[in-house]
Image: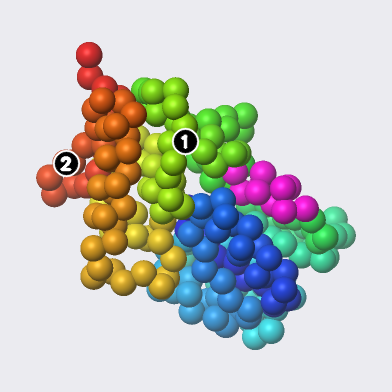
Amino acid sequence: MHILVVEDERALCETIVRSLRRLAYSVDFCYDGDKALALLGVERYDLVLLDLNLPGADGMTVLRTLRQKDRDTKVLILSARSAVSDKVEGLDAGANDYLAKPFHLEELAARIRSLTRRQFTQNDVVLTCGQVAFDTKSRTATAGGQELSLTRKELGILEYLLLHQGCPVSQEELLDHVWDNRVDHFSNSIRVHISALRKKLRAALGFDPIRNRIGEGYVMEEEKP
């Protein structure tokens, strides 16, 4: 998942970023609303963690500007404003959730899981496809019942493929949703990580559940009988 953290308290921002990266999320960050608007204009994000009291454009301006052209990107407001009226204003402006400061990182992680499970129900914490499973809470993966030792990028790729199982996912889409904005789009990084992930899945299962659809992308599928 590709997440943008917009928070002007630098120590808090850096703590959130470190925590999310340890959970294998791809994270970009900035400290002001103008930079946030610039990033949102050129990058695709699955989720934005948005403070309201920002230098430059404030958080509500960022939110309303985003919603003028993008209704799909999830937005979780993080704010010291805890009055009911503030929460109502944020949700009415298009935020998907509102978390008052101070908060625990564990609760933030749970809110993120809830917002990004998409087609899955609120109670689903494990994404599965055949013998492959990914626990969105512990951020661990298994194949054939054995835990896989995966890098952060491999975990991110696997999660995204499981969320879109049966549908082709292009390299460009993986770069948008699994890598941060520091990636070189002309590098061979995506192929290297996909190859390593497929090798580990093949070793655990005896077959490769990731298929190549020529001209379309990668597809996570169950083993055919």
Q: Position of residue 128 (x, y in %)?
A: 44, 28
Q: Is residue 107 magenta?
A: yes
Q: Is residue 219 magenta?
A: no
- The span from disc 2 to disc 1 (Cα, nearest Å) is 24 Å
Please, what is the three-letter code of the amino acid marked with disc 1?
Ala
Q: Nearer the viewer, mark 2 or mark 1?
A: 1
Looking at the image, can residue 184 be seen?
Answer: yes
Tell me: residue 89, above or below residue 35: above
Q: Position of residue 110 (x, y in %)?
A: 67, 44
Q: Between 53 and 65, which is closer to the camera in this rendering?
A: 53
Please, what is the three-letter code of the amino acid marked with disc 2?
Arg
Of the numbered discs 2 and 1, the one sitting upstream in the chain is 1
Q: Position of residue 64 (x, y in %)?
A: 60, 68
Q: Residues within 10 Å of mark 1 (few under 14, many from 20)?
A: many
- Residue at numbered disc 2: 213
Looking at the image, can residue 94 be seen?
Answer: no
At horizontal 56% and vertical 71% (from top left) the residue drawn is 29
Q: Which residues are magenta?
A: 104-113
- Label of residue 141 in the image: 1
Please, which residue is most extreme toward the left here? Answer: 214
Q: Is residue 64 left or right of residue 151?
A: right
Q: Mark 2–mark 1 contact, CB under 8 Å?
A: no
- Label of residue 110 in the image: none
Q: Residues within 10 Å of mark 2 (few under 14, many from 20)?
A: few
Where residue 162 sits, quadrant-wise, is top left
Q: Under tag 2, what secondary structure? A: strand
Q: Is residue 183 left or right of residue 202?
A: right
Q: Under tag 1, what secondary structure? A: strand
At horizontal 24% and vertical 27% (from top left) the residue drawn is 207
